[in-house]
Image: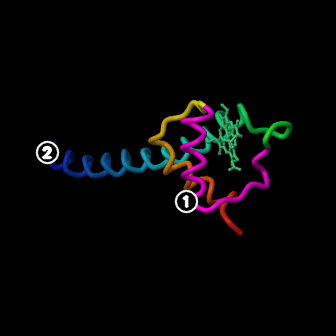
Amino acid sequence: MYVRMLVILPLLAIGLEHSALVLAKDDAKDIFENVCSMCHNDAINPLDNVHHTRQEWNEILKRMITINMAPFEESKIPALVNYLLKDHGPN
Ligand code: HEC
């Protein structure tokens, strides 16, 4: 019994850590697809061809919250910037 716990606990820890990472990734995608699209879509302010550096995205996303009242947590900005840099980074 005791030996079995020793085997299971590390596996549990890895499982939790893994799901937290996946959650963070989905979080950013979720915000982009559901929150940004409230104000940015094909018809209004499209983001398809918008490209920015990491620093620019940081400033823009902060402005979305403080000035444009975009409803997402400021704590999500780092994950969002990482997500945006994949398809909307500088080029
Ligand atoms: C509540 C509405 C709203 C939401 C939600 C919103 N935006 Fe905006 N966004 C605006 C408005 C209004 C402007 C134009 C004024 C400005 O640039 O601040 C804008 C401008 C922008 C610009 C152009 C900035 C520039 O300097 O040219 C980018 C890029 C942008 N938004 C990205 C995003 C992203 C990415 C998200 C989601 C994380 C988002 N916005 C969510 C309203 C919103």
| Residue shown at 60% from the left, 39% from the top | 64
Which residues fall within the magenta stretch? 46-68
Seen in the picture, residue 79 relative to 69 is either above or below; the reply is below
| Residue shown at 36% from the left, 45% from the top | 16
Q: Secondary structure at mark 2?
A: helix
Residue 27 among magenta residues: no
Seen in the picture, residue 8 relative to 55 is either above or below; the reply is above
**Are there few (<14), some (14-19), or many (20+) residues within 10 Å of tag 2?**
few
Mark 2 CB near ligand 1 (8 Å cut): no
| Residue for badge 2 | 2
| Residue for badge 1 | 55
**Are there few (<14), some (14-19), or many (20+) residues within 10 Å of tag 1?**
few
| Residue shown at 30% from the left, 48% from the top | 13
| Residue shown at 27% from the left, 52% from the top | 10
Which quadrant of the figure shows ligand 1? top right
| Residue 62 spot, x, y in % from top left | 54, 44
Mark 1 CB near ligand 1 (8 Å cut): no
**Where, by quadrant of the figure, is residue 53 drawn?**
bottom right
